[in-house]
Amino acid sequence: MDIMIFIYLMIICVSLALFVFVAYEDFRTWKIRNIYIFILIALFFAKYSVISLWGEEAPWHPGLLSSLAAGAFLFALGFALWALKLLGAGDAKLLAPIGLFLGWNNLIAYSLFLLLFAVIASIALKFPVPTIIKATQIGMRLDEIRETGKVPYGVLMVGALVATYLYKHSGVF
């Protein structure tokens, strides 16, 4: 059983690392490549396979139907927002693996964290980037985001995912 726990934890760590990388790429380029979405979906099914092979009840893990419903719901919501030109296509697609990893029961916590991060970002983007940060690559990018008003929503979505994971699984909050 110990090897199953190790494999499960490795899949979670790789998945979260890839989510963070996707957020970084979105911040840097305003693009989310389809290959990352496919890899994240494959990692979800690998994670679920490990849970299934485990053979024990895993009350901390959302069921397959819960995860599929959350992934489909968030994808449909993202598609609707994309159709209304309120969200980029990559951001809309990113919602599917986020829903898969969270499951239906965690969507309220995710929504609250997403709202919190969106409010913080909108307030922060009202102010100019401090001079000491403005000379860095991150500062220049933040200044460009502030001036254009084009927000890399993937950063907020992944931040809310990580915060939800920390809240639900480690008791950090």
Image: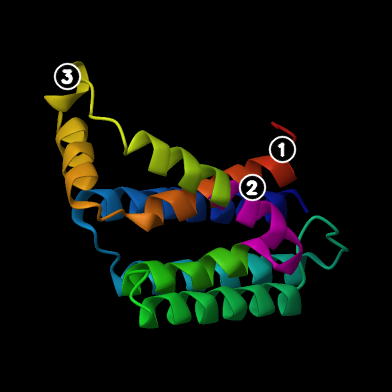
Q: Closer to the camera, 139 or 51? A: 139
Say which quadrant the C terminus sits in. Answer: top right
Residue depicted at 53% across the width and 77% down the height:
77
Marks 2 and 3, how far apart at CA: 34 Å
Say which quadrant the N terminus sits in. Answer: bottom right
Q: Choose top left, top right, bottom left or bottom right for residue 163.
A: top right
**Residue 2 location (% of width, % of height):** 74, 48
Classify 10 Å Cα crowding around label 3: few (below 14), some (14-19), many (20 and above). Answer: few
Residue depicted at 24% across the width and 58% down the height:
30
Which element type, helix, strand or loop, lies under badge 1?
loop
Q: Is residue 164 left or right of residue 98?
A: right
Q: Where is mark 3, residue-wise? A: 131
**Residue 69 location (% of width, % of height):** 68, 79
- Give the residues in magenta: 102-114
Q: Where is mark 1, residue-wise? A: 170
Task: State whether residue 133 is above or below residue 170.
Answer: above
